[in-house]
Image (cartoon, rainbow, N blue to C red):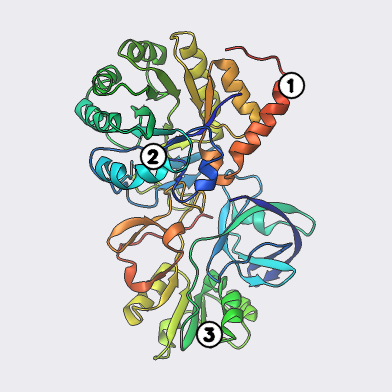
Amino acid sequence: MIPVLNASGCLDALTAPDVARTLDAYVTKTVTPLPREGNPPPRIAETDVGMLNSIGLANPGIDAFLGEHLPRLAGLGIPIWVSAGGFSAADYAHVCSLLDTRAEVDTIELNLSCPNVDAPEEDALAIVAAARAATVKPLYAKLSPALPNLPGTAAAVAAAGADGLTLVNTLRGLALDPATLRPRLAAGIGGLSGPALRPVALAAVYACARAVDLPIVGVGGVACGRDALELVAAGASAVAVGTALFADPGVPGRIRAELAVLRGRVPDPGV
Amino acid sequence: MRRERRRVERADDVGPYRLLRLERDGLDAGEPGQFFMLEAPGRLLPRPLSVCLATPAELAFLIDPVGPGTRPLAALAPGDAIHLLGPLGRGFRLDVERPLLVGGGIGIAPLPYLSARLGGPPALLGFRTAGHAEAAALLPGAEVVIDPVLVTDALPSGHDVLACGPEPMLRALTAIYPDAQLAWEAPMACGYGACYGCAVELDGRLQRLCIEGPVVAARRVTGASTMRAGR
């Protein structure tokens, strides 16, 4: 049984609770210390090979999240993974220390790779170490496939105390308006998701599974059971669905049904 | 929340637009102004389209084939089938005393269904060209103006305005009728609050149009230009 999650930022469980309940765990949109409105619109654009977004970590901030959102999310009856973000190691540690006190939180996923905001000055290792010191909850590090040495970073965050990896976040991309040749997103560049990201995610999972002994959530262009099975064969122990949820909120159930058929025919990858 | 799959019953040219009629087969049409996400054949993301006509047998959507999603939708033929999700969002409030429907261009799309639900109130439509104005046949009895005459040139007073159209028209209506109900559009990946792509500035902060709208009170729209519909 391969757990199926949503990719952070690709489902609002409070507006679509019936969809969230079809998941094995719900991953929240990234929560930062302070509220963020996000980037100006337009902030999505479809391309021929995927989708660009430049949402920019819109979220209510950790205080409103803990006070208003988390109690309602707990009512869903599924494990809640909270995606934590920030602009310094201290930001991540602050968010993690507050999440640490809440029984509703199953796991914390550190968003170390948002392509739409300025990256924190510290590297992934320093952020994971700061977060590790702030919480005893399971910590997953979500990494960018654009890192120059992804398996090396995976090994470093493992040594810093990460309990798992989420691979991958989006890649930076640009789409131009066909008439004006100007960027279609107000922010210019956005994060590319969808089918184009699938081979990238497979390669990242494949490389990191050989570098570290941590569970890996595979994310990137998963739209069917075959896609999920391939990520598991490459080394993932769970998969998360992102862009495919936008086109079909029933995709988690369909992936499970297709996996059930496939696993009768395909040798168990035995990861 | 589940996608349904429905067959195309008919598809008719209406001026430069295409009226796509899907078998209804138990689908809830929702309130006028609500929308469905229609699978755009060959594309990654579905497209948001408001219900144009709702009969016991069919739901119809008016399509302006101007982009990579709307073109394959307009090319669908009887017997083809697509997925759709809906009804979604918030539509028009129907508890108005003196309704006047105002449409601009493809913004006529939700008005035939709205007119049917309101018992055929007066309507005013504006179009770019006489060719586009052929779509006025969808709303018999409507007054029609053609560019350079604008709907705001022909607008009577003392009505409850319910409108859909291009952003400049909606902005101009807001100045005259701050209580108007306006159907806006924005690029949407999902239509059900998941993607946060359709954010528009309402009440001074960015909010999801698919959840708050697409029909919102004119005075709530506080932001600068935000509309760039998914095509």
Q: Which mark is residue A264?
A: 1
Residue A73: horizontal and vertical position, in percent?
41, 43
Crowd band around label 1 with a 10 angstrom C-alpha radius: few (<14), some (14–19), many (20+): few
Q: Left or right of A185: which side holds B118? A: right
In the orientation shown, which residue stands out farthest toward the left? A90
- Alpha carbon separation for disc pair 2 and 1: 35 Å
Q: Chain of mark 3?
A: B
Q: Earlier in the sequence, mark 2 or mark 1?
A: 2
Crowd band around label 3 with a 10 angstrom C-alpha radius: few (<14), some (14–19), many (20+): many
Which amino acid lies under the numbered mark 2 shown in the image of this protein?
A: Lys
Q: Quadrant of the N terminus of chain A?
A: top right
Q: Left or right of A62: which side holds B218? A: right
Quadrant housing residue B180: bottom left
Up-down relation of residue A137 to residue B152 (above or below): above
Residue B25: horizontal and vertical position, in percent?
74, 62
Q: Which mark is residue A29?
A: 2
Nearest to the observer: residue A105 or residue A5: A105
According to the picture, the residue beneath numbered tag 3 turns out to be B123
Q: Chain of mark 1?
A: A
Q: Nearer the viewer, mark 2 or mark 3?
A: 2
